[in-house]
Amino acid sequence: MTNTSYQGVAIGPRFTIGIPVYNGEHTLKETLDCCAKLPTDLVRVVISDNGSTDGTYTMVQSFAARHHNVSVYRQERNVGAASNFKYLLDICNTEYFMWLAADDVIADSLSLAEVERLFEEYPKAIALSPFAMVGEVGAPVPDRGNCSLVGSRACNTLNFLMRPGVNSRFYSIYRTEHLRPIFSSIIGDGNVNYYGSDIVFSSAVLRKYQWPMAPSFVLLRKPGLSSDGWKLRRALSENLLGALFPSVNFIHQIVGMSPLLEKLPVLLVGSLLYLRYLIGPIRHRLSQYLRRL
């Protein structure tokens, strides 16, 4: 990340990276190492341990002791993923903010100067999406959701829904003051937890703002729980029926926030997305089985 100064005087932290983590001791080291390469005078790193039962808290405490721009918080009990994400946003006091998953890595090409230039170029944007590489099988491959969404609100929403990928767009760099009200309107007090809520959030952002992509902001994402849709659906559902039909809630939310003339096309595209998610876990399990043969 490029250093920024004014009349020869370094500017204080303007960018917060929030890392929510639960039992991440086996994946977190690489994530912390990438954060250690960023300029400490411009970037704060805030970690919220969601009541981990492994060695995560000891690891992050040791990391914070060696880096003065790192702060660590620990939830007394596991408050759920959504609440932990919200907690990091609530305590952010810098102009820019992003969440970083505890098994993902940011390339050191990230430039604050480019971030500011793109926000100036796109005044209707509150977020800059990374170019994401996903390590599904073997070498990383480009995320299917990579693209800039800088057209009309309707086109941006439909383009996003037609190729959300694994929604790496969620892990963008945001203008903090504009992010808070949108996140709160979708996630509420942090207790909202349903399959596809991140897609609903991204759709809500696109209803008001553009979402360009920062070419030098590269995020290497690792396959986690979401790589196996059945596990995630069961985790967010109380029964098998909810796991088999997980998308009804997020389709209802997306259609509900759409203007009258756009409800039908959004419903059609959302339904296609639903079918993809329904088939996806089966395809993933099948590919795993074939690789073991």
Image (tube, rainbow, N blue to C red):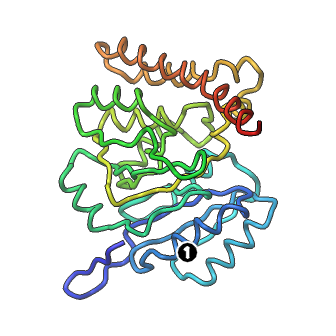
| Figure check: 246 above or below 74 | above
Please give left or right for residue 127 compared with residue 102 in the image: left
| Figure check: 36 above or below 260 | below
Quarter of the image where one finds residue 66: bottom right
Judge by depth and name the residue closer to the eye, 121 or 84. Answer: 121
Q: Position of residue 275 (x, y in %)?
A: 55, 18
| Figure check: 94 above or below 269 | below
Which residue is depicted at the point 46% across and 43% down? Answer: 143
Q: Secondary structure at mark 1?
A: strand
Which residue is depicted at the point 34% across and 60% down? Answer: 216
Residue at the far front in the pictured view: 293
Judge by depth and name the residue closer to the eye, 166 or 81. Answer: 166
Q: Which residue is mark 1?
A: 70
How many badges with numbers are in the image?
1
Please give left or right for residue 94 compared with residue 3 in the image: right
Judge by depth and name the residue closer to the eye, 133 or 230. Answer: 133
The quadrant of the picture occupied by the N terminus is: bottom left
Quarter of the image where one finds residue 3: bottom left
The quadrant of the picture occupied by the C terminus is: top right
Quarter of the image where one finds residue 241: top right
Please give left or right for residue 106 compared with residue 208 in the image: right
Amino acid identity at mark 1 = Val
Q: Position of residue 44 (x, y in %)?
A: 47, 71
For the residue carrying disc 1, how many other residues have a C-alpha within 10 Å: few (<14), some (14-19), or many (20+)?
Answer: many
Which residue is depicted at the point 34% across and 29% down? Answer: 159
Q: Position of residue 37 (x, y in %)?
A: 48, 76
Q: Position of residue 184 (x, y in %)?
A: 48, 42
Which residue is depicted at the point 48% across and 62% down? Answer: 106
